[in-house]
Image (cartoon, coloured by chain):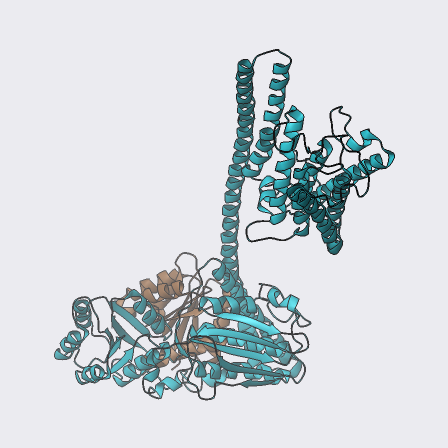
Amino acid sequence: MATPAPPADGDGAAAELVVSRRALRRVSIGTAWFALAVAAVVLLGWILGDETLKRIVPFHREVSMKTNTAVALGLTGWSLWLSQLEKPGRAGARICAAAVMAIGAATLVEYTLGVNLGIDQLLFHEPFGVVHTSSPNRMAANTAFCFVALGLALVLVGRRAGKWCPTSVLALIVAAIAGLALIGIGMGVTAIPGVSQQARMALMTAITFVVLAVGCGCASPDSASVRRFFSAGSGGLTVRRLLPVAFVLPVALGSVRLAGEQAGVFGAEVGTWLLIVAMIICIGGVVWQLSGSIERGDRELRQAEHDLRRAVAEAERASDAKSQFLSAMSHELRTPLNAILGFGQLLEFDELDAEQHESAHHIVEAGRHLLGLVNEVLDIARIESGKLTVSVEPVALGPVLEEVGALIGPLGRERGITVEIDRGAGEPWRLLADRQRLQQIFINLLSNAIKYNHAGGWVRLYCEPGAGETLAIVVADGGPGIDSSDQDRMFEPFERIGEHAAEGTGLGLALARHLAELMAGSLAVDSQPGAGARFILTLPLSVSGPADLPPRSSVAVAIGPMPAGASGDVLYVEDNPANIALVESVCARVPGLRLRTAATGRGGLDAARSRPPDLILLDLHLPDLGGEDVLEALRSRPDTAGTPVLILTADATFGEQARLLAAGADGYLTKPLDVHELQAEILRLLAASGPESGSVPGPPAPAPSGRAAVIPA
Amino acid sequence: MSETVLVVDDDRVMRLLCRRVLERAGYVVIEGADGAEGIDLAMSRRPAVAIFDWEMPRLSGVEACRVLRGKPDLAGIIVVVMSGHDDDEHRAAARAAGADDYLVKPVMPRRLVECVGGLVGARAA
């Protein structure tokens, strides 16, 4: 296939193809013009009666192109040209293509039925016997078939039938038929199809068919064959190098052999031998040269991959360095902030005049803002380095929203925004979440909704059951809304939008979305300019858990976000590291609580005997002894008989619970543990165990009276 | 009688801040500039509470806490470690060293008073 090399143009060859679509379209249009020009010249020849113009090529033995062939070639070119315009004339292209099909089909009917429909001599009369045709001025049968195929190809241009692109398949068929004819004509062989004495395809017709087939192929740039041919990979390279050789080489060498034999230079045997040797040398050389090109490509690819890996490693190192820098920076910023916030607050507490008080207030507010930024930067750095972890546990939504409401209320009142928090109309929703981080997300969404609002506007938080076991918590506002182009951007760190841009840190939403995703949830926004915004936080619901347990003692209610101090020595007998970590973090929140752990029942008993604790937390499933046996052993010894024991276990029936309590357990909690319940239980049991072993000061004011009053809340 | 609080920090401003806050809350405040000095003061003055900054030259706050916990006659002293690191690793390390509480900088005046008051109250009860 003599594919003309498409001009390489600079307007961006597609990544995977060596030529652009525009170049392919130019090739198509070029072939269309070529066909139109050939048709025009031949028809001119018929008008002037000039035999050379009818043949175009000045070979003595060549036949002339028939008038219907010229007309159909012209129509084909016209159709192709119309289909490839910037604004394709699809209807016109289809009509021309249908006409081409009709001409081809009618001629085939004449051949098969042996009738004369009178179409051959319609335009020009050719005397019988001038050339070897079955009927005067009738195109060859294979030419007629090619027109049917080409017409169909152009009717279907731009369509796909499953994996196949019909246009390129039909174009290949036309190219094959015309190619066969060309080989025959070129080698002077007449006893093959298409070159019969009765109806032979004209040389110029065959050439134009090949050119038009290429044009049709280029007109379907999405077809697999065209993509393969122009692929930038090794496959494309192979096909572009070898296919022309496969077509041209045998024809060229065969012609030489034929000419040599006819001239009597060598005999048939020598001719065959020479042909084989020449083929081997030529094909071998081309393959060798091709393999070099492929090798070079592979080397470049490997080099590129190596470079890419290095760049990725470099980027990761840079990212790590950035995270470390941000972490160190946040830490270093805390020390000066300490002085700003500390002394600023002391100033606020002093007796100042109104102006001084306002100045001190501004210092403290700016310090708080900076501290928020430092914390958020630190969180973002942790997320990016994968170090931020959340401890997901069943969390009752109601109390969290109550706290959030108390924290956010002042901001709403200050801005004159009505904040309504609907806690789900008595639905005791329990989420699987990190309580502190959940609160952080709510504060962030609500304070954004308040800040980016109209004067006197409203903000509302409500819950909707989501898909599956999820809950959607919606923060809606009647503010100015968010342009769709900003909606994705605002979840990126340090992106701020709107007129209040200077107010936020630019990190809050990015962090909130990260946190939601860490908790296996999502955070989305639904907004239109002028119609407010809805931020939708979706989190998994807790389906099991201690939701059925009766409400705990009033101590639980008294535990605020900052627990009152208690002191005591707590021993936790447990073999599961995850549970130990959880209880450790709970105890760490209560100042004065010291935690010891033992991984086995015997270890626990030994620890309890060597230094009697103020409280024992006991897992029921231990590697050596059963929890009940440990409980019994503890109760049987005088030094531990009175020590309160809190049972922590995952699976126990109410009957078992009663039995354990009868056996001397003082409390009972089921896993997954609710941090707040656990904390409340620990404090309750420590307080109950008497002043000699542990104590809890009266909540919630832990400071000695008279002192707390010095620092106003 | 007012309780004595020992504030050990290499940062003079931080010591001053703690002094101002704690003195307003009615405590007597003594200051040390590094871990070693802190331990000396703890032994000679026997404060009710010793607050150690984590990052200090010579002896870090956590090391000082560990040294203090190794002396049985000083077991009654409440030890608080403060640091700019707000993460679980640092908290756990401070607890392992025997600290009674951990304060993250910046330490708000109210939080400092609550912390010291809570621990002193719990110990006295």
Residue sitting farthest toward the top: A265
A579 or B35, nearer to the observer: A579
x 73%, y 33%: residue: A204
Residue B71 vs residue A153: left or right?
left
Image quadrant where one finds the N terminus of chain A: top right
Image chain in cyan: A
| Residue A22 rendering spot, x and y as whole percentages | 70, 46
Residue B38 vs residue A268: left or right?
left
Q: Decide: is B30 above or below A701.
A: above
Residue sitting farthest toward the right: A48
x 59%, y 25%: residue: A250
| Residue A510 rendering spot, x and y as whole percentages | 55, 66
Q: Is residue B47 visible?
A: no
B106 or A507, nearer to the observer: A507
User: Total marks drawn?
Assistant: 0
Residue A340 vs residue A455: left or right?
left
A171 or A374, nearer to the observer: A171
Residue A468 vs residue B97: left or right?
right
Q: Is residue A107 visible?
A: yes
Chain B tint as drawn: brown
x 52%, y 16%: residue: A273
| Residue A450 rendering spot, x and y as whole percentages | 61, 79
A553 or A390, nearer to the observer: A390
| Residue A695 rendering spot, x and y as whole percentages | 30, 82
